Image: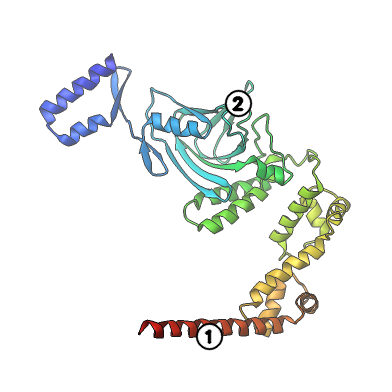
Amino acid sequence: MIQSILDDALRIFLHYFCASPTSLATVETLHWTLEGGIAVSDPIDENTWNGRRMCRDEWIDVMSSIGLQYRFDSSRAGASIHSSAYAGRSAVVNLDIAWQSVSPIMQHGDGDDLFVQVVNSGTRWIEQRGQTVALGPGDVAVLDPLTWYNATVRERTSLSILRIPRSALRDRGMRHRFPMVCCPNPSSADVCATRDFVLYLAANAGKASKELFARLGEQCLDLMDVLVYDRSESLPARSNEVTVLRAKQLISRHFANHDLSAGRIAAELSMSTSSLRRALQAHGLSAMDYASSVRLEHAARRLRVGASHGLIKAISYQCGFKSQAHFCRLFKARYGMTPREYSVCHGMASCETAQMMETSGTANREKSEF
């Protein structure tokens, strides 16, 4: 009733005293609430979702479509800003909100994702199973929508969120169910480094190329074990397939490290060297043989663009080989020629291809002249 009277009074005032179409249009975009006897303006289209302005009801509907129930404090005004981009299979979200709360919509069907949230500024309170956790700037939380929670913000709060597929953690042999909010130790250097990588990803959403952003997203998934495990706890049993997958991923990331060894790989996977060896042998693999294969493939790609003797030495070192002689022996055993011969051969092939393309282009131009 009071709302209607205020709206009508304002329309009459603007119509007779302002007589401005702009002012009348402004009325259409204002929502008036009474707080302490004072009318406070609250723009209806104050919220922004990936650049699109929308009212609170639209915001709530969009959030509901992804399995989240949002509730606004009707007595408070404040814009909500959402921007997101996909990093491969993960969604990277930057969120700026105030005076609202959110809970997962149970049985919605979107429980296949997990939320890794980093607080940039402000405070977020998470209530779950009778406990309340307060997250401040720099804190990280992993939330599982299969377990009900209520996350609230009051003053303006900025969040960076990584929405990751649960299957990505399961395939990597990582923990992927969380009956309680998971809050990694903020004093851990590894946790801080992983958090900073998530923030780097969020800062480059929409800036890096789609291909590079997808690669960064996969690398971020590989780091999630730092956030979801307490290193003092024993890790769950994993299949040989998952162990082999994670070992290959580690080798692919660290092939250039001259100190890479089966022992270091096993330590990174939180398992013994003998357990790693058995898992790999079951698939006909050896950790260091696979590392040599990856190193040779990277070296071959670089040699295909041409290389002098000095550059060949640099390439062998940058690809993880301590000895150039050892690199040359392994390279010839795999490719049937020395690195130098391989570089020259592919350089000649590239020249011949370029000449053929040029000849074809000339012929086509000649035909077009007639």
Q: Nearer the viewer, residue 198 or 237?
A: 237
- The colour scheme used here is rainbow
Question: Which residue is disc 1 drawn over?
Answer: 355
Q: Is residue 199 above or below residue 315?
A: above
| Disc ID at residue 148 | 2
Image coords of residue 81 (percent x, y)? 42, 39
Question: In the rendered image, which quarter is residue 296 located in?
Answer: bottom right
Image coords of residue 29 (percent x, y)? 28, 32
The secondary structure type at the circle numbered 2 is loop
**187 sits left or right of 70 in the view:** right
As measured in the structure, the alpha-carbon distance from the residue carrying label 2 to the one carrying label 1 is 65 Å
**113 sits left or right of 46 in the view:** right
Q: Amino acid at mark 1?
A: Gln
Q: Quadrant of the C terminus?
A: bottom left
Question: In the rendered image, which quarter is residue 334 located in?
Answer: bottom right
Image coords of residue 157 (percent x, y)? 47, 36
Q: Residue at x 69, y 80 (%)?
A: 312
Q: Is residue 367 visible?
A: yes
Q: How many marks?
A: 2
